Image (tube, helix red, strand yellow):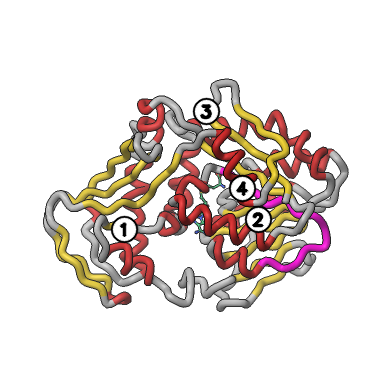
Amino acid sequence: MISTPPLSAGQFFNTSDGRFQSVYLDSPHSFSGLEGQDVIEGLTQAPKVLPPKYFYDDRGSQLFEQICGLPEYYPTRTEAWILQHYAPEIAEITGPCQLIELGSGSSTKTRLLLDAYQAQGYPLYYQPIDVSAGMLADSAAQLLTDYPTLQVQALVGTYDQALTALPPASAPRLLLFLGSSLGNFTPLECDQFFAQVTTVLEPGDYFLLGIDLQKDRAILEAAYNDHQGVTAAFNVNMLAHLNYRFAGNFNLEAFHHQAIYNPGDCQIEMYLHCRQPQSVRLKALDLSLDLARGDSIRTEISRKFNLEHMQGYLQAQGLSPLLTWVDSQHWFGMILCRL
Ligand SMILES: C[S@@+](CC[C@H](N)C(=O)[O-])C[C@H]1O[C@@H](n2cnc3c(N)ncnc32)[C@H](O)[C@@H]1O
């Protein structure tokens, strides 16, 4: 097991065999120099919103892993099915590549790609990027055990920080953005994200995108309102995270979870509704707010895409779609692009 000591921004940690390096793009207790500014902005605007990255402290990452295995949560197993079937083709098309992954989480599906690259006899190099330092360290440790020739450089930080800090590569790169995490971005954030991606990638680099597709409302809403209440616990955990991170006093018992599909914007919207009035103070941010009964905080959007529109959008962003795969129900799509 790798345990990375607390590091300051820019510091890194190496294992003695040189196969693992972990780089903190920011201090371990801060997502950016403007720590918590996005919380202040989100909670003082109408409607109130919080950035989904705050879901992912250690407990949130564990809950997300549980969500991935729930019967209602089809995205993970559907995307995995696509990779089980097409990862060898992806490896053949790209040839030897450095794999870089934004929001890598447990890297479980990435293993299907690593298997395919290994089967081709390509050298294995993986750069996972995630805000969840604990999950990153644990998944890297497992990968290093399971793939004896694998080199891992883990970057702890946000997508934005990582895309700004990515070192130049000595080989073509395959940038992975799986799990339909793109769906958490507003259209404007999507444009900003792709402007950054196309600046960082070089001609000949690849981009692999997994996206959740539009489908029946009942299937979508069931996926985010599971019977066991794991998604509800995941949602409320964001406030527990804010409480310890920013010395806050959200009364967790006073919130309930809701996820609804907004057909106008083709997106699932996840909310925390306040059941009783409360005065919230986040001491470390010098932020106080009064929440009334019925007040809501939107914690996530998860946009559902149309495959053809996305292909056209990617093309317009400067990424040429090469191949597209879907599962048999057309629930999830994967697009391989080249810059
Ligand atoms: C929906 S999960 C997807 C995990 C994995 N890629 C999968 O497909 O199962 C999103 C992952 O991205 C990370 N994450 C969320 N927002 C992030 C951000 N702004 N910057 C970096 N990582 C982020 C989370 O910690 C989590 O591991």
Mark 4 is on which residue type? Ala
Q: Residue 239 carries which label?
A: 1
Q: Does the residue labelled 4 lie within 8 Å of ligand 1?
A: no
Q: Residues within 10 Å of mark 1 (few under 14, many from 20)?
A: many
In the rendered image, the vertical position of residue 333 relative to residue 187, given as above or below: above
Amino acid on which disc 1 is placed: Leu
Q: In this view, does 32 lie above or below 47?
A: below
Marks 4 and 1: which is nearer the front?
A: 4
Question: Dot 3: within a 10 Å radius of its alpha carbon, few (fewer than 14), some, or many (20 or more) residues?
Answer: many
Residue behind mark 4: 316
- Residue corresponding to mark 2: 140
Q: Name the residue under label 3.
A: 331
Q: Nearer the viewer, mark 2 or mark 3?
A: 3
Q: Which residue is drawn at 74% across and 44% down?
A: 114
Q: Main secondary structure of the magenta part?
A: loop
SS of the residue at dot 2? helix
